[in-house]
Image: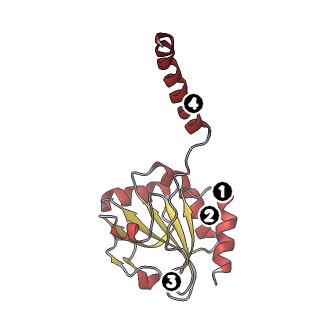
């Protein structure tokens, strides 16, 4: 009986190691998709984030033309990485509106001056209330909104060069 007790710690370590290795090899999918895709934009009215752009409300996203709604923050490193691709979308004719999440007007203005401003309107969501109502779990995230204010697609994470044609197609299909 004493011999088995000597091997017990090694067996327990082996089980722990196997569980740990399984978690590394097959990690859980931690992406949280919005339950709002396919539903109307929740009603909101946000104050303007910077003087150069008007405020943003849900009514602005239901004016008959498909649009993108980008959620970003000046403190967000992936938001910097996606900035040139948002400018490319704007140059290709996409209308892009934004929600600045948990940010200050001065930091937002500095961010836009440094990395470009592709946005038609920018609302500030200092408490992330609208962001949470959209089912957004972080920044950056971009939603494709059809002309009736229905959310038709959610892009989680930064938009990259290879995403631009797909997003333009989603906008075209949302007409």
Of the image marks 3 and 2, the number of the one nearer the N terminus: 2
Mark 2: secondary structure: helix
Q: How much space separates mark 3 and mark 1, taking CA atoms?
A: 26 Å
Q: Please name the residue that numbered disc 4 is placed on.
A: 18
Q: How much space separates mark 3 and mark 4, taking CA atoms?
A: 49 Å
Of the image marks 2 and 4, the number of the one nearer the N terminus: 4
Report if the CB atoms under discs 1 and 2 are less than 8 Å apart.
Answer: yes
**Few, some or many residues within 10 Å of mark 3 (<14, 14–19, 20+):** many
Q: Please name the residue that numbered disc 3 is placed on.
A: 149
Q: Which quarter of the figure is the C terminus placed in?
A: bottom right
Residue at the location (43% across, 51% down)? 76
Q: Please name the residue that numbered disc 2 is placed on.
A: 88
Report if the CB atoms under discs 2 and 4 are less than 8 Å apart.
Answer: no
Of the image marks 3 and 1, the number of the one nearer the N terminus: 3
Residue 96: image location, x then y, percent:
52, 72
Q: Is residue 50 in view?
A: no
Residue 112: image location, x then y, percent:
43, 60
> By what rule are the colours in the image chosen?
secondary structure
Of the image marks 4 and 1, the number of the one nearer the N terminus: 4
Mark 1: secondary structure: helix
Mark 4: secondary structure: helix
**Few, some or many residues within 10 Å of mark 2 (<14, 14–19, 20+):** some
Q: How much space separates mark 3 and mark 2, taking CA atoms?
A: 23 Å
Q: How much space separates mark 2 and mark 4, taking CA atoms?
A: 47 Å
Q: Compare residues 111 and 102 and report the one nearer the observer.
A: 102
In this picture, is 20 found above or below 147?
above
Q: Please name the residue that numbered disc 1 is placed on.
A: 161
Report if the CB atoms under discs 3 and 1 are less than 8 Å apart.
Answer: no
Report if the CB atoms under discs 3 and 2 are less than 8 Å apart.
Answer: no
Q: Which of marks 3 and 1 is in front?
A: 3
Res 153 label: none
Mark 3: secondary structure: loop
């Amino acid at each position: 009986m004493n011999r088995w007790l000597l091997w017990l710690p090694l067996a327990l370590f082996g089980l722990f190691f196997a569980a740990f290795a399984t978690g590394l090899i097959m990690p859980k999918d931690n992406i949280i998709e919005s339950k709002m895709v396919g539903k109307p934009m929740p009603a909101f009215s946000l104050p303007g984030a910077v003087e150069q752009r008007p405020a943003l409300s849900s009514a602005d996203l239901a004016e008959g033309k498909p649009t993108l709604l980008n959620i970003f923050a000046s403190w967000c490193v992936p938001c910097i990485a996606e900035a040139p691709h948002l400018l490319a979308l704007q140059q290709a004719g996409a209308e892009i509106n934004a929600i600045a999440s948990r940010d200050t007007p001065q930091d937002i203005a500095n961010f836009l001056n440094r990395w470009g401003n592709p946005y038609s309107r920018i609302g500030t969501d200092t408490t992330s209330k609208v962001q949470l109502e959209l089912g957004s779990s972080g920044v950056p995230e971009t939603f494709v909104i059809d002309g009736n204010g229905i959310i038709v697609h959610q892009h989680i994470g930064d938009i990259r060069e290879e995403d631009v044609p797909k997003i333009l197609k989603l906008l075209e299909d949302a007409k």
